[in-house]
Amino acid sequence: MTTRTESVPLVDLGDGNPMPQLGFGVFQVPPEDTAQIVLWAFEVGYRSIDTAAAYENEAGVGEAIARSGLSRDQVFVTTKVWNDDHGHDRARRSFERSLERLDLEYVDLYLIHWPAPAAGRYVETWEALCELKSDGRARSIGVSNFLPEHLERIIEASGVTPVLNQIELHPRLQQPELRAFHSEHRIATEAWSPLGKGQLLGDETIRGIASAHERTPAQVVLRWHIQLGNVVIPKSVTPERIEENFHVFDFELTADEMEAIHGLDAGDRTGPDPATFG
């Protein structure tokens, strides 16, 4: 595995804090393997790690940070509060447990994992996150899988705008209306399932562009995200793929190639619908 020396571009969040545009996701990474896999990611050059209470691997992320030799300010850590812990007091207790598992004094970004609108407690949860930001233990706060109506409600209730919304986003689900709302309110867009759970890698358009650049289809899709300005968090458990996904800053897609990928949007979700899930 090759250690990369160049730095990942930073995105300035709405509260002034910087965040690496490319991070490493650990969704569905087995807890017992997480520390080693995150250490591989650190070796390649990743400095942003995305986990969640629901992934049950926060402890492995914390172990990797402790073993990495990196200083705390060199690593950007994101975690999330799960649906079962919505509500002011439950959310604060969930945050405390996440900090304990991570063995950290603060996280760089804390997110509400899903709005879970049927429960009707995401505003109360958001108010708890605002308190965690005020006391410095969550440097930045945001949300995940929120639709415009959910975003509008928490902004109106609290006066605090999330710095980021992590959403399912890939060439077959480009979410232009939600991204436009983000731009209007200075909310960063972060893509989960950026490769569409691998379903895009056999697409003829993507493969043709990859061939033209002598790159892999995955690299082309990740580069598309980068050029759109998205924060992106690909996940892998193999050293070769972890490294491959990092090699996306030394080539550029043309305007025609970007437009060709734009034409792949079909509104196809691979995950749950935020309007009804939870």
Image: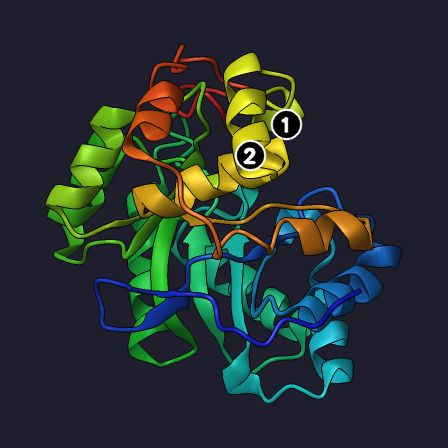
Furthest-top residue in this view: 266
Per the model, the C-alpha gap separating discs 1 and 2 is: 6 Å
Q: In terms of depth relative to the viewer, which is nearer, 103 or 176?
A: 176
The quarter of the image holding the N terminus is bottom right
Q: Is residue 257 left or right of residue 8?
A: left
Q: In terms of depth relative to the viewer, which is nearer, 183 or 102?
A: 183
The correct choice, above or below, for 171 with respect to 123 in the image is above
Q: Amino acid at mark 1?
A: Lys
Residue 86, percent from left and from top: 45, 46
Residue with the mark numbered 2: 193
Q: Is residue 273 left or right of residue 237?
A: left
Q: Find numbered disc 2 in the image and state the secondary structure of the residue it sits on.
A: loop
Is residue 152 at all visible to an observer of this figure?
yes
Residue with the mark numbered 1: 197
Residue at screen point 56% across, 60% down:
94
Q: Are marks 1 and 2 in contact (CB under 8 Å)?
A: yes
Residue at screen point 67% across, 45% down:
27
Q: Find numbered disc 1 in the image and state the secondary structure of the residue it sits on.
A: helix
Which dot marks residue 54?
none
The correct choice, above or below, for 188 with respect to 12 in the image is above
Assess disc 2: are there few (<14), some (14-19) or many (≥20) residues with their C-alpha within 10 Å of its C-alpha.
Answer: many
